[in-house]
Image: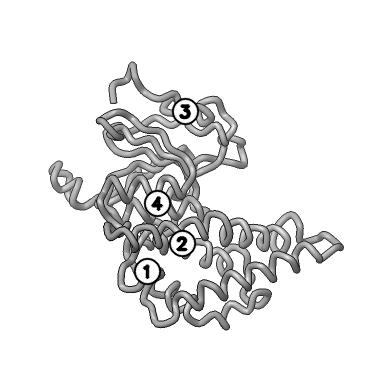
Amino acid sequence: MQHEHAHPITRKWPAQFPDWLQLYSLPTPNGIKVSVMLEEAGIPYEAHRVDIHANEQFSPEFLALNPNNKIPAILDPHGPGGQPLALFESGAILIYLAEKSGQLLPMDAVQHYETLQWLMWQMGGAGPMFGQVGFFHRYGGKDFEDKRPLQRYVNEAKRLLGVLDQRLAGRQWIMGDDYTIADIAVLPWVRCLHVNYEADALLDLASFRNVQRVLASWLERPAVQRGLDMPPAPKPRRQTALSCHWNALLQLQGLGKASIRPYL
């Protein structure tokens, strides 16, 4: 990407490796979807942390990429036709990266659309409903005297978990033997119920045994472990996180193992 044609977002988050895909994100469930997808697909990327507590998502530079002021968002310098592509909405990004890499989205027509069906199930149902449980149980709404909103979302979250649990009965992944973007979309939100929302007892999460089994398998994947904390927490000065096959990439450049310098 030539400097004179650089996207405005690069003024606030300069790219150390401008030929790599640029990720603007946080390790939230939606952010984790994209970082895990990039790790699984082996796409070189540079991760930039967007500080929502400092309202960086409302900065002119970020809004130039995503007018909806939400993370995650990406800037691919090698998009369709070789032109840069700015993209937001985690579901759209997952589909784009699957098509770009030729991975994690089945080619068979029936399997293809069933995978997208479960992606949309997460985008339109599980994600929003689980998020409301978090708000009313763990965050701003936890002190509301009226507990009817919490109960409404608890009931719906349990229903959705039941749907997912039934789907996973006798299956390794949502689509059976094939690990897909459906799993990458859904499982960060299931993990969030445990790790962020502390809703184990509230939702009786242990009772959804198939969900717990598949979540445990997902968390064992090396690419998932790499993607869970991307971008990493800030250090005293702004850090740029570079990930995805560091060892191979740096060895090709004669720089040795990447594990000794995971961040710039």
Q: Nearer the viewer, mark 4 or mark 1?
A: 1
Residue 100 occupies which quadrant of the picture?
top left
User: Which disc is residue 12 wearing?
Assistant: 3
Residue 82, horizontal then vertical, whole percent: 25, 30
Residue type at tag 4: Ser
Q: Which residue is mark 4?
A: 35
Q: Which residue is mark 2?
A: 118
Q: How many marks?
A: 4
Q: Residues within 10 Å of mark 1 (few under 14, many from 20)?
A: many
Distance between mark 4 and mark 1 Cα atoms: 21 Å
Closer-to-camera residue (83/124): 124
Q: Which residue is mark 1?
A: 175
Secondary structure of the residue carrying tag 3 is helix
Q: Nearer the viewer, mark 2 or mark 4?
A: 2
Residue 72, horizontal then vertical, whole percent: 48, 44
Q: Residue furthest right?
A: 145
